[in-house]
Image: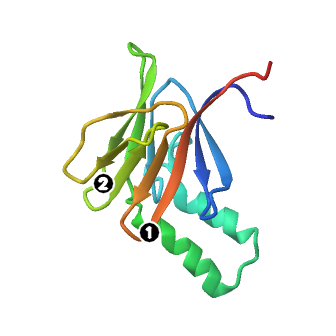
Amino acid sequence: EGFAPGHYLVLYNDKRKAITYFRLDHAGSVIIGRSSERNSSNDIDLTICWKQHYEKQNLSGDEFKDKMRLVKGISSKHAIVRYIAAEKQYVLFHLSDKNFTVVTLPGGEKRERSSQNRSRVDLVPDCLITMGDQQNFVLLRYKIISLAK
């Protein structure tokens, strides 16, 4: 409730609670990373989102550093999400040369994207996108929100 209908990427904290919703539009591409180098309003800077969420919780210095460690597995330009108008769907491309992306479909199938694999992943509602490395990662979900009936 309270969200405009549309396509979203939802960022989850380490306890799998939604902390930020990013609305996707059909124009342009969205780069997801640790820092928004293009300074575009469409780019998702996961470090800022993560930091803002945990600053609100007034954690101690060590606790805060521990939570911020999870975004270290994200590259500055980790992935890109693009709308393919001819197919009427969003796709994700892995861009990182160092870290991994795993897309888990609602049925449990996993599509791993290592640094050498640049092929696209078609996003389907409720798929989970794990970005990072083996120890430090964040979780996003692709979601379509429609009007309540």
| Label 2 sits on residue | 96
Q: Residue at x 36, y 67 (%)?
A: 134
What amino acid is labelled 2 in the image? Ser
> Relative to 14, is 69 above or below?
below
Sequence-wise, which precedes: disc 1 or disc 2?
A: 2
Front residue of 47 and 112: 112
Query: Label 1 amino acid?
Result: Asn
Query: Residue 19: where, in percent of width, then height?
Result: 68, 54
In the picture, the quarter occupied by the C terminus is top right
Residue at 50 percent across and 69 percent down: it is 70
- As helix, strand or loop, the secondary structure at mark 1 comes to loop
Q: Nearer the viewer, residue 59 or 128?
A: 128
In this view, the mark in front (1 or 2): 1
Q: Quadrant of residue 123?
A: top left
Label 1 vs label 2: CA separation? 15 Å
Q: Which residue is mark 1?
A: 136
Find residue 4 and report its image quarter: top right
Residue at the far left: name it: 116
User: How does the figure colour the protein chain or chains?
Assistant: rainbow
Check contact, mark 1 vs mark 2: CB within 8 A. no
> Crowdedness of circle 2 by 10 Å Cα count: few (<14), some, many (20+)?
many
